[in-house]
Image (tube, rainbow, N blue to C red):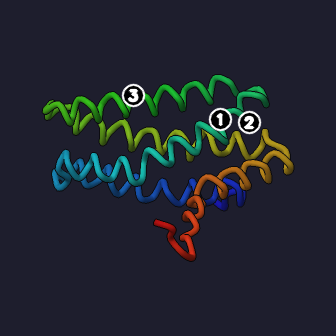
Amino acid sequence: MKRAAALAGLSREHHTALVLAQRIAAGTLSPADLQARFERELEPHFRAEEAALLPLLAAAGAGALAERTRREHDGMRRLLALVLAGDAAALAAFGGALRDHVRFEERELFPDAETRLTPTQLQTLATQLEDAATPPPAAASPSHLDF
């Protein structure tokens, strides 16, 4: 299914998340690797959705979907903390939660957003997501230093 342009990037990131869930299920991902991937890939994805998509959905009448998404994100954050504390069972639970969450977003959340949000809201979302993905400019280096 073709996604609305505003959601396409988030949807592509879901493929990476599913690969991560498969690696967890196969037992080929260490807790340290999960932590690194979470910080680099999943947490920025969660924060982008929470900052840009979920407020738009809640304002458009999909508060229950937005709240479910937040709860699931928070649940995965808690599972990661358990994994890092040495809870071996939490790793498998994290992988299952991630897989199920991606399926929920692809099958319910994103289709709802595509039908519920106006073209203007989708454009606003696209702009916000693009701004969130753009790293801040580097500090200008001085042309000379005064000592």
Q: Are marks 3 and 1 in contact (CB under 8 Å)?
A: no
Position of residue 67 measured from the top left corner of the image (x, y, whole percent): 58, 25
Q: CA distance from mark 3 to mark 1?
A: 17 Å
Left or right of residue 99, residue 94 in this image: left
Q: Amino acid at mark 3?
A: Gly
Front residue of this view, candidates 72 and 47: 47
Q: Is residue 75 above or below residue 45?
A: above
Position of residue 142 measured from the top left corner of the image (x, y, whole percent): 55, 71
Instruction: Give SS at disc 3.
Output: helix
Which disc is residue 107 wearing? none
Q: Which residue is mark 1?
A: 54
Q: Are marks 1 and 2 in contact (CB under 8 Å)?
A: yes
Q: Is residue 65 above or below residue 120?
A: above
Q: Amino acid at mark 1?
A: Leu
Q: Are marks 3 and 2 in contact (CB under 8 Å)?
A: no
Which disc is residue 75 wearing? 3
Q: CA distance from mark 3 to mark 2?
A: 22 Å
